[in-house]
Image (cartoon, rainbow, N blue to C red):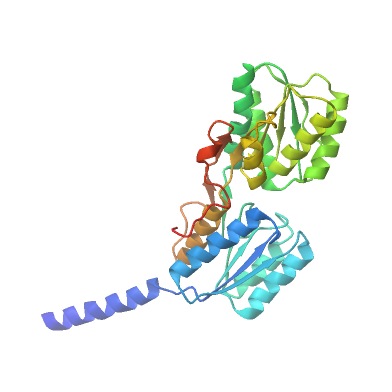
Amino acid sequence: MLKKILLAGAALALVAGGAQAKELKSIGISLGSLGNPFFIALSKGAEYEAKKTNPNVKILTFGYDYDLGKQVQQINNFIAAGVDLILLNPGDVKALRPAIENAQKAGIKVIAVDTNAEGADAAVTTDNVQAGRIACQYFIDKLGGKGNVIIENGPQVSSVVDRVQGCKDAISKTDMKILSSDQDGKGQRDAGLTVMKSLLTRFPDVQAVFTINDPQALGSDLAAKQLNRNNLIITSVDGAPDIEAALKDPKDPMVQASASQDPYALARKGVDIGVDLLNGKEPAQKVTLVPSSLVTRENVKDYKGWQADRTGG
């Protein structure tokens, strides 16, 4: 009798063990642009984690080049290919919901990375409120909580909205005045330059500038130089390679800090959560926030950036 019980228990354990070990055989990845170092790092992080799970996993990675219709088609292609998991950087918070639901009806788990998407099974993003807060706290501390600030806004995706909110939260506890916070630099250097030239012409008395990402920060820096301004503190969010170079350049003193993102870690966490979901394990929260660290002129030499070698994990 005891032998039968032990054999039955062993059989149940084998069944349970098999149920817990659903293999990730294929993954579809849809990212903004494969020419952008942020998304290159995201793709490398996803590939590392996926191959750690299954060395023979099939990985389909595409850039949608900020074309929402193209991203929807990529999701449809992933469904047709029968992938187990989709990792996507959503081009729109709401518009992708029907495509995501179609993937889920096909038994595919969908994870959003960097920004959230309605209907996704889970999301992994930078803690963008915290990132905006620490980026602006930097110039608050430098200026003793006094002076005028420009916030150069951007496309109204969740990450940008959160960064601006974090910055405003920090400033609200000071005597600083926000002169403008609604102008869209479109997440780009050239647009950031154009918007900042207009703002600095309109507001000559400015001590600090916060931009929602590094390209806009570099464009704003150039705008200030073209207007012969050399007395600004410029901070942003990203920790991109170009901002690393600016922070190391003694001839570029106005760019002073960037709250860094870690796209490699975001993607690894996204795949990890996706594999858990495939095996019936729900994440502790629907949106997992990855904290940001502030990169400054003082600590940039120690910063492990987007292009750092991560082959060791």
Can see residue 24?
yes
In depth, the one of 97 and 155 nearer the eye is: 155
Could you tell whether 224 is left or right of 266 in the image? right
Q: Image height check: is 275 above or below 117?
A: below
* Residue ID at (16%, 83%): 4
Q: Residue at x 72, y 56 (%)?
A: 94
Q: Is residue 113 above or below residue 99?
A: above
Residue 264 in picture, x, y percent from top left: 54, 55
For the C terminus, the quadrant is: bottom left
| Count of numbered circles on the image | 0
Residue 294 versus residue 47 in the image, above or below: above
Q: Is residue 149 found left or right of 275 in the rendered image?
A: right
Q: Residue at x 45, y 73 (%)?
A: 54
Quarter of the rendering containing residue 212: top right
Q: Is residue 22 above or below residue 47?
A: below
Does any portion of residue 279 appear in the rendered image?
Answer: no
